[in-house]
Amino acid sequence: MEQGTETARRILVVDNDNKLLSIIQEYLELCHYQVTTAATGLDALRLLRSENYDVLLTDIVMPDISGLGLIEISRKEFPELLVIAMTGYSKQVKDLTTERSPDYYLEKPFNLAELSKAIESVLQIK
Protein backbone atom coordinates (compact mmCIF):
# COMPACT_ATOMS: atom_id res chain seq x y z
CA MET A 1 0.00 0.00 0.00
CA GLU A 2 1.36 3.40 -0.91
CA GLN A 3 1.44 5.86 1.90
CA GLY A 4 -0.89 8.79 1.53
CA THR A 5 -3.19 7.15 -1.02
CA GLU A 6 -5.63 5.73 1.51
CA THR A 7 -6.16 5.39 5.22
CA ALA A 8 -4.01 2.73 6.85
CA ARG A 9 -5.87 -0.47 7.59
CA ARG A 10 -6.57 -1.02 11.27
CA ILE A 11 -5.59 -4.34 12.82
CA LEU A 12 -6.39 -5.61 16.30
CA VAL A 13 -3.86 -8.21 17.44
CA VAL A 14 -4.82 -10.41 20.41
CA ASP A 15 -2.41 -12.76 22.16
CA ASN A 16 -1.50 -13.38 25.80
CA ASP A 17 2.20 -13.63 24.83
CA ASN A 18 3.42 -10.05 25.28
CA LYS A 19 6.71 -10.69 23.46
CA LEU A 20 4.87 -11.98 20.39
CA LEU A 21 2.43 -9.05 20.57
CA SER A 22 5.35 -6.60 20.52
CA ILE A 23 7.04 -8.32 17.58
CA ILE A 24 3.84 -8.43 15.54
CA GLN A 25 2.93 -4.83 16.38
CA GLU A 26 6.37 -3.50 15.45
CA TYR A 27 6.42 -5.44 12.18
CA LEU A 28 2.90 -4.45 11.12
CA GLU A 29 3.54 -0.80 11.92
CA LEU A 30 6.62 -0.97 9.67
CA CYS A 31 4.21 -2.27 7.00
CA HIS A 32 2.11 0.90 7.51
CA TYR A 33 -0.83 -0.66 9.33
CA GLN A 34 -2.45 0.94 12.36
CA VAL A 35 -2.07 -1.66 15.09
CA THR A 36 -3.78 -2.03 18.45
CA THR A 37 -2.95 -4.91 20.76
CA ALA A 38 -4.82 -6.72 23.52
CA ALA A 39 -3.50 -9.42 25.86
CA THR A 40 -6.89 -10.98 26.63
CA GLY A 41 -10.06 -11.78 24.75
CA LEU A 42 -12.06 -9.58 27.11
CA ASP A 43 -9.82 -6.57 26.41
CA ALA A 44 -10.12 -7.29 22.69
CA LEU A 45 -13.91 -7.40 22.89
CA ARG A 46 -13.95 -4.01 24.64
CA LEU A 47 -11.75 -2.57 21.90
CA LEU A 48 -13.87 -4.08 19.12
CA ARG A 49 -16.95 -2.49 20.64
CA SER A 50 -15.35 0.94 20.91
CA GLU A 51 -13.29 1.23 17.68
CA ASN A 52 -13.52 0.09 14.06
CA TYR A 53 -11.00 -2.44 12.78
CA ASP A 54 -10.44 -4.04 9.40
CA VAL A 55 -8.74 -7.21 10.68
CA LEU A 56 -8.82 -9.20 13.90
CA LEU A 57 -5.69 -11.33 14.35
CA THR A 58 -6.34 -13.53 17.37
CA ASP A 59 -4.68 -16.34 19.21
CA ILE A 60 -7.03 -19.20 20.06
CA VAL A 61 -5.92 -20.33 23.51
CA MET A 62 -6.17 -17.37 25.92
CA PRO A 63 -7.51 -16.60 29.40
CA ASP A 64 -11.06 -15.29 30.01
CA ILE A 65 -12.57 -15.26 26.49
CA SER A 66 -10.78 -17.70 24.18
CA GLY A 67 -10.03 -16.82 20.59
CA LEU A 68 -12.83 -19.19 19.58
CA GLY A 69 -15.28 -17.23 21.70
CA LEU A 70 -13.93 -13.95 20.36
CA ILE A 71 -14.35 -15.13 16.77
CA GLU A 72 -17.90 -16.29 17.46
CA ILE A 73 -18.89 -12.97 19.09
CA SER A 74 -17.17 -10.88 16.43
CA ARG A 75 -18.90 -12.80 13.61
CA LYS A 76 -22.28 -11.90 15.14
CA GLU A 77 -21.54 -8.31 16.15
CA PHE A 78 -19.10 -7.28 13.39
CA PRO A 79 -19.87 -9.35 10.28
CA GLU A 80 -17.61 -7.18 8.07
CA LEU A 81 -14.57 -7.78 10.30
CA LEU A 82 -11.93 -10.00 8.70
CA VAL A 83 -10.56 -12.66 11.04
CA ILE A 84 -7.20 -14.40 11.13
CA ALA A 85 -6.88 -17.14 13.75
CA MET A 86 -3.52 -18.35 15.03
CA THR A 87 -2.53 -21.16 17.36
CA GLY A 88 0.42 -23.30 18.26
CA TYR A 89 -1.73 -26.11 19.57
CA SER A 90 -2.85 -29.42 18.14
CA LYS A 91 -4.82 -30.34 15.05
CA GLN A 92 -7.90 -30.68 17.28
CA VAL A 93 -7.72 -26.98 18.14
CA LYS A 94 -7.23 -26.18 14.45
CA ASP A 95 -10.36 -28.22 13.64
CA LEU A 96 -12.37 -26.33 16.28
CA THR A 97 -11.05 -23.05 14.92
CA THR A 98 -12.02 -23.97 11.37
CA GLU A 99 -15.60 -24.54 12.57
CA ARG A 100 -15.70 -20.84 13.55
CA SER A 101 -14.85 -19.92 9.94
CA PRO A 102 -11.91 -17.55 10.24
CA ASP A 103 -10.94 -15.93 6.95
CA TYR A 104 -7.40 -17.27 7.37
CA TYR A 105 -5.61 -19.65 9.72
CA LEU A 106 -1.98 -19.33 10.85
CA GLU A 107 -0.13 -22.09 12.64
CA LYS A 108 2.48 -21.01 15.19
CA PRO A 109 5.31 -20.64 14.86
CA PHE A 110 4.96 -18.60 11.68
CA ASN A 111 7.37 -16.15 10.11
CA LEU A 112 6.61 -12.52 9.37
CA ALA A 113 6.36 -13.19 5.62
CA GLU A 114 3.54 -15.68 6.35
CA LEU A 115 1.82 -13.06 8.50
CA SER A 116 2.05 -10.49 5.67
CA LYS A 117 0.63 -13.02 3.22
CA ALA A 118 -2.28 -13.77 5.56
CA ILE A 119 -3.16 -10.10 6.01
CA GLU A 120 -2.84 -9.28 2.32
CA SER A 121 -4.98 -12.31 1.50
CA VAL A 122 -7.85 -11.36 3.80
CA LEU A 123 -7.75 -7.69 2.84
CA GLN A 124 -8.43 -8.73 -0.76
CA ILE A 125 -11.79 -10.06 0.47
CA LYS A 126 -12.91 -6.56 1.47
Image: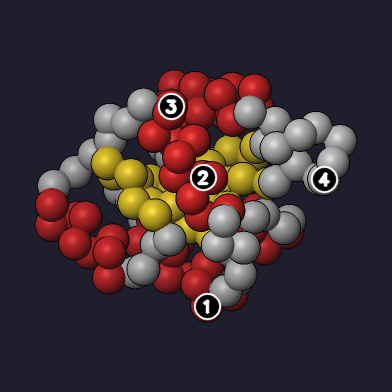
Q: Quadrant of the C terminus?
A: bottom right
Q: Secondary structure at mark 4?
A: loop
- Kindly indicate whether the residue at mark 4 contacts the one at mark 2 (C-beta within 8 angstroms): no
Badge 3 amino acid:
Leu
| Of callouts 2 and 3, the N-terminal one | 3
| Of callouts 1 and 2, the N-terminal one | 1
Badge 1 amino acid:
Lys
Badge 2 amino acid:
Ile
Instruction: Give the residue number, with chain letter if any, for mark 3.
Output: 112
Residue at the farthest bottom position: 76
Disc 1 and disc 2: Cα gap in Å?
Answer: 21 Å
Q: Quadrant of the N terminus?
A: top right
Residue at x 49% of width, y 50% of height: 121
Q: Secondary structure at mark 2?
A: helix
Which picture quadrant has residue 72? bottom left
Residue at x 80% of width, y 32% of height: 3
Badge 4 amino acid:
Glu
Instruction: Give the residue number, with chain letter if any, for mark 4.
Output: 6
Disc 2 and disc 3: Cα gap in Å?
Answer: 11 Å
Give how far across and how far down residue 28 sits, in percent: 59, 30
Instruction: Give the residue number, with chain letter if any, for mark 1.
Output: 76
* Residue 119, label in figure: 2
- Kindly indicate whether the residue at mark 3 contacts the one at mark 2 (C-beta within 8 angstroms): no
